[in-house]
Image (cartoon, helix red, strand yellow):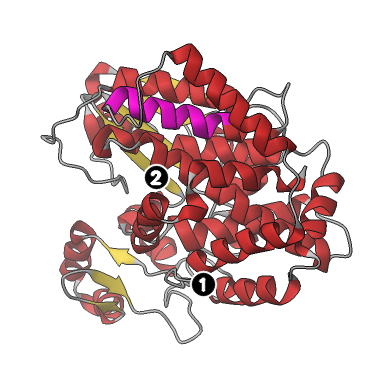
Amino acid sequence: MILKVPSYYEKFHCIADQCKDNCCYGWEIDIDEGTMDYYRSLGGELGKEITSHIREGEENTMIMREDGYCPFLNEKKLCDICIKMGEEALSEICTEFPRFTMEYEDVREKILSLACEEVGNIMFSTDEKITWQEHEMPDFCGTGDDAEAAYDADGALYGNDEAACEDDTSDGEGYDDDEEVSVDADQLNAVSKAAVALLQNREKPVAERAAEYLLYCKRMQQELYGYHTGGEVSGQEQEQRESRLIAECREKEVTPGEAYAAFLARMERYEQLEVLDQNWEEEKKRLRAAFHEDNYLECIRNFHAAQQGREYEYEHLLVYFTFRYFMRSYYDDNILNKAQFAVAGILMIRDMDALRFLENGGTFSVEDRVAVAKLYSKEVEHSEENMEFLEEDFQFEDIFAPEQMIRQLFFAS
């Protein structure tokens, strides 16, 4: 069993009560069956106290306080269950967040979510390129959950003995192990590696890199899965076509009206998402109020001009989205969709960034970067309903067509 983690993974430690935000606030906290059975078995006053705050049903969920916090979060922003009973008494989602897992063949990928501000603090604190780190699990750990259990929450790779290999409570992505796949993992990993190399080619502006990445993934979608449009052409000719398209999008003059119309089209789709955080609702209102046809393009360009030397932040975002989602195509056969998600993400985040820049009077700090990425991640990545909504949009909405998004990437140029 191979465990893959991003290069910043081992730097992460939960900062608990030092966190400006809180993962015990504003979420639906699910209680897995194993933990629920344990709580029921406790008996006594403690057991009654815990179960009285859980809504039991097909899915067991914590009943949050009126202020939106978990009932077991104390005034010091620490968990009373953890304090009284230890971390092993927490539900899977509490012990795993912000870690998320993707598993295929003999590989388990583990990544940290940008919905956690400390992850953002780590990721955006350096311009060092993000890479995968691979660790082979020891033989005594077997495979699957047992193998990864040795990689504990603090980043230590292995325990000292077989006791380290108790069942992992991973919040992994659920797929049918018997589901047939049409392209093997080695092929997809090769495509993913090439895609990330395009994104991290710092000899080119990040907008051009993102455009190349999007068209490369579109081409790989056609080559690997046979989704061809038009006559057969050689790989070299296809690359030349892609280069011409990028050049045309880069050089074509954009009008304020065109740019604002694209902004509105994106907003209309994102406004349809399920609202998980009231901050997202406020963000949408502020975006609508701040931008109009006469100032949107100028605001985007002013923000872009002021961020010279910080393009690596968008590179990190694109690589993060690729690491997080690309290998889902092992199961759903849709590489292009993953690239569309990444590029649509940075286009929406760019609008949110420009809003902060405008509101701050022409400044945009690393703290702003972390806050924007966190808000976007919490709203979009942590709702399967929202993810599915956008995935469908990527297939049918013109604003998310690859050629349209490439045009939008160059608005700031």
Q: Quadrant of the N terminus?
A: top left
Q: Is residue 181 left or right of residue 62?
A: left
Whole-percent x, y for residue 277 in the image: 51, 72
Residue plotted at (33% across, 18% down): 187
- Quadrant in the picture for residue 143: top left
Helix, strand or loop status at disc 1: loop
Whole-percent x, y for residue 45 in the image: 27, 80
Q: Is residue 313 above or below residue 291?
A: above
- As drawn, the residue found furthest toward the front would be 231
Three-letter amino acid code of the residue under disc 1: Asp
What span is colored magenta in the figure?
212-225
Whole-percent x, y for residue 25 in the image: 49, 71
Helix, strand or loop status at disc 2: strand
Three-letter amino acid code of the residue under disc 2: Phe
Q: Is residue 44 left or right of residue 12?
A: left
Which numbered tag is attached to residue 100? 2
Q: Which residue is mark 1?
A: 277
